[in-house]
Amino acid sequence: MAVDFRNQTTLITGASSGFGTLFARRLAARGSDLVLVARRTDRLEALAAELPGVTVTTIGMDLAQPGAGAKLAAAVAERGLTVTSLINNAGFGTHGLFHEADPQRITDEITLNVTTLTEITRAFIEPLRAHGRGVLVNVASIAAYQPGPTLAVYAATKAYVLSFTEALRAESRGTGLTVMTLSPGPTETEFFDVAGQGADGGTARMRPETVVDLAIKALDRRNTPPSLITGARNRMMMGVSRLAGRRITLAALGVMMSRGQTERR
C-alpha cells in the first residue's frame, strides 16, 4: 500500500542537489509539505519556487558543523513545525589514501555522515513514531557493505549508517513508522565533484532519478526492505562480495580503487 504523504511534513537534508532535490520533487507531487535543509540557500529557494501546492520551509545550515543536529531541531521548533517523515540525505565522501588526507576534512566527513545524522534522527524520531504513518530513510551506500580502500572513512561512516538504521527499524516495529536504509551505488550526482571522479572505481553510474524512484517504490511496498541496494548490477556485486569473503573482496577492491586513484592523479 502506497505511503500517504498528504498532511505530512517531510524533512530532507542535503536538499540542494542530487537525491535530496529529487526526493523533494517526488514527495511534493505526492502532497507532502517539506522542510528543506542545506548550505546553499539560493538553491533551496529556487527549488521551493518549483513546488506549488505544498508548504515548503527552507533552512540554510552547514550540517557538518558541531552541534548542527541540535541547531536544526531548534530551528524547526521555532517555526512551529511537526516533522512526520525524515530523509537524512546530507553527506559527502573523501577519496584518496588515508595518510594523505586532510585531518579537518576527515573530521567534517565523520561529523556530517555520522554525528549529525544520528543527532537529527534522535531529535525527530519520537514525533515520527507517534505519527506512525511516515518514513525514516537514511542514505548509506553500497560502500557500507565492505571496507573501502581509498574511501576508508566514507565506507566506514556508511557502515555505521547501515547498522544504525537497521537497528532502528527493529526498534520501530509495530509503530507504523517505515524505516529503510537506501544504499545506492555510483550515481551521477555532485558526490564525485567533491570526492573526485576516480571514487567510482571506474564502474558505471546510475541516474539519480532511477535511484529515488526505486526508493519510493520500495517504501510503498507492504514489506519494505530494511536496506535497499539500488540496481541489479549493484546487488549482484554485493552478492559476489559476500560469497568471495572479505579477504578476496578487499584485495580486489584495493586493485580497482588504486587504479582509480592513479588515474585521478
Image (cartoon, rainbow, N blue to C red):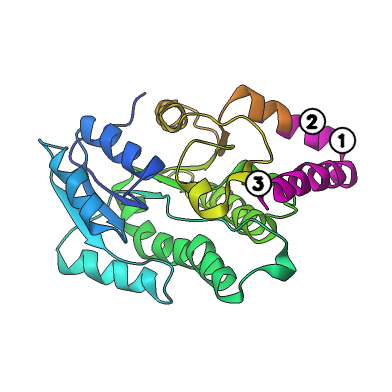
Task: Please tell me in which quadrant of the rendered image residue 70 appears.
Answer: bottom left
Mark 3 or mark 2: name the one nearer the start of the chain.
3
At which x and y percent is residue 244?
87, 35
What residue is rendered at 13% in x and 40% in y? 54
Q: Is residue 14 visible?
A: yes
Q: Is residue 196 above or below residue 185?
A: below
* Mark 3 to mark 2 CA distance (whole Å): 14 Å
Q: Is residue 32 above or below residue 102?
A: above
Q: Is residue 66 above or below residue 73?
A: below
Circles 2 and 1, Cβ within 8 Å, touching? The answer is: yes
Residue at image mark 2: 240
Badge 2 marks a residue whose secondary structure is helix
Answer whether residue 191 is magenta in the image.
Answer: no
Q: Is residue 176 visible?
A: no
User: Badge 1: how crowded within 10 Å, few (<14), some, or many (20+)?
Assistant: few
User: 72 or 101: nearer the eye?
Assistant: 101
Q: Amino acid at mark 2?
A: Val
Task: Tell me where the magenta segment starts and ends, as one range.
Answer: 238-265
At which x and y percent is residue 49?
13, 43
Q: Amino acid at mark 1?
A: Ala
Q: Amino acid at mark 3?
A: Ala
Task: Please tell me in which quadrant of the rendered image residue 125 appears.
Answer: bottom left
Answer whether residue 249 is magenta in the image.
Answer: yes
Residue at image mark 3: 143
Residue at image mark 1: 244
